[in-house]
Image: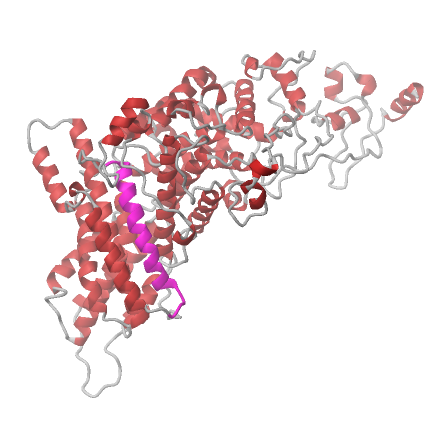
Amino acid sequence: MASGSLEQTSDVSGVTPAYRRNGKLFSCEPCRRGKLRCDHRTPVCGRCARRNKPGQCFYHPAPLTKQRSSPTAPLRPSLQPDLASTSPTDLLPAHDRSPIGLMSPPSSTTPSIPLLDHHSFAALSATSLPHASLLQSPLQPPTAPASVYDDRSLVSSVSYTSPEGSTMSFRDSKAGFLGPTSYNAVFSENAGSIGVIPEADDHSHLPPVAADKIKQGAEVLSLLRDMPIYQEFTQRWFELAEGAVNLQPTFRIWTEELWAEFGTVLQEGKPEELYSLSELVWRNTRKPMNVHGQMTAREWAKAPSGRNLRWEVVGTILNVVGLIAVNLSNWDAIFDSIIEKYVDRITFAERMRKASEFCLCFCYESEVLNDIYISFMFEDLILVSCLKGEAHYTAWQRTGEVCDAIVAMGMHQLTAPDADTPFFLCEIRKRLFASAYGHDKMISTFLGRPPRLSHRYCKIELPLDLADEQLFLEGAELDAALAELDVNGWNTNGVQGRATWSRVWLQNMRIREDILEIALGSGDEDVGAQAEQILYKLEQARSSYPDFMRRTPEQVLEECDATFNTATRVKKGRLAKQVTAIFTLCVHIGIVHTEFLLQRALVNRKRADTRAMIPKSRRMLKLVLLAQSRKDFLRDFQGDITGLMALDGLPAAGVMAIELLKQEQTRMHTPDILPRSETIQDLSVFISALATVSPGEGSYSICNQGRKALKKVLDQILSPMQAPTPGSTEPPYDDISLYFPTANDADFLQWLENFEWDRSVNPGVSHEHQ
């Protein structure tokens, strides 16, 4: 056998390499089998000559193909369009890009790469990686380690045999929340009597991570070299407000421990070290997070940090930095540190978003389902909405994914602290559910689509009005903080924190869902009776607010002005007033918007008088303009102000503009309901405010289309008009009806709900109305 092989080698070693079907030359057998680049030289290729193995170099006339391992799981469809043509390296400025040369994210059309098994990677890292101890591999290093710069070298020793069970999910046992009608309900309810013991998850035989995934992870981690800059952003935000859905102390622990543990690796940016770190993070992410009832908040926060770093945490850090960048002003001095690398604020935020989406893909492929992952998903949704706009399909799709994960985790069926769930985690889940539930109703309202989360299948409970730091308290200190709350769970210090806003938001959105049933439902129920019940719920919710929540935005801003006119103002006080002002504005605008929507629904379903909407429209637009007029004072909440204009200001301004236009054309003015001069001034100011939204903002297309439409209406109102001819049957409307249908109130309201603001208006085509 040996002599035959040598004879065959000698016979074909001098043969000129043949061409493959794609026109490329065949590689020699050692290069082909090792997946190495071959220069096709004869009789011995350059690589075999350098390795001093000329006797093994031969070109097989008909090389056999081998069945490779099963393809790696593709990205979820919602992420493929954004990432298919982007690699993490592309997110860095050109002069900062690492030479690691990693591949672009996978897609359904990307050819699969053989899996790099743990033995091969551990052997490689044990010799070439300074921080190989992270892997804790007992294997001895090979004599000739491959270079990480050559991806084909990395897989030269890979076994192509599929690992046992790799064709099935390694977490098939993790079905998530199962309700009382599920397949195992009978067994779980009688587990004690029939002796059923839950099986522990076995993660000792996880399939290996594909080599290209580890490389992509290394590139994402290379972005963390700017962690000191990111910490400046987060420090700036946490001086101002609490976390969005992740607690501020939790986020601090993640960033500080990440930098303390891996700061040197990230700063040096050596590809082999980043590769090793990526493999570690992948391995951590594929393990479940164990939580028990006696776990403290600090222990929970430290569990996925340091050497236990997970992709959920890496993605959250990048995502939060992007969210902060979106909300700050363009002229903020903090952007001086990134202007040379990232050009401007929006570019920086967009790069953070794309990098965090890679982490989201990594979690998806690792089949992660835990509290941190859902928080990460929600914050990613908010950043996507800020950069692409709420009307973008991606924002709608991500909302569905967050709602699905909420249900799969069982957060829609909130439970009290028990042996498996500590108190602080129950409160975190309440806040997360409130945020997701409210966002679901908000985007359903904005797009006129049915919501995903229904109160009929959810146990809705308000989170306690505690600050982030208070949830980290233990024992007597925690008991003292709970004792300071009133009987309804509100704080008694008069402080409007994130939890305070979350409680009001959840109450308001619960009522909003009832209105959506009227506006979007198809039933023949008594709409009038439903409306009466909704008005009663609104009044009940309003009466449950503590006194400090009943102050109007005007009163709050007047207090801010009085404070800042004194000589004793300090930075911390200014920041606290800023937070109170923006929260108060958002809460009051949201409540008025809910009442406005109820009137619109009644007009649609009962053909009620449209003039009933005018007071709510005027109040809502006044509050939006009030926020816009204090844009300098609310300098750290620019994204919120833009959102208020797009989501709340445009519907109110549209109703007022059409009503004013109809009065002008019919000569039937109602100055007591809609004063002409004041309305024109408010609409003019609002149009100017819409023009300040830059093309890089996610709501730009919505605001731009609204600005053009409102401007067209004002042009019609302010331009000379001809009086209608006596006896004429033609309505006194001109081509403006192509933009705003004014002949029928119900048609206008339906148009206002269904008009696609992000599409350009074609004046030659009239809109169809259902």
* Place of residue 419 in the rendered image (x, y in percent of width and height, measured from the top left): 45, 30
Give left or right: position of 287 versus 584. Answer: right
Q: Residue at x 79, y 21 (%)?
A: 44
The residue segment tinted magenta is: 497-524
Q: Residue at x 70, y 30 (%)?
A: 163
* Place of residue 245 in the rendered image (x, y in percent of width and height, measured from the top left): 36, 36
**Residue 755 visible in the picture:** no
**Residue 466 visible in the picture:** yes
Q: Of 133 and 198, which appears nearest the observer?
A: 198
Q: Of 693 and 25, which appears nearest the observer?
A: 693
* Figure quadrant of the C terminus: bottom left
Q: Residue at x 42, y 25 (%)?
A: 294
Residue 93 placement: quadrant:
top left
Color scheme of the displayed model: secondary structure
Extreme residue toward the bottom, this view: 727
Q: Residue at x 7, y 36 (%)?
A: 562
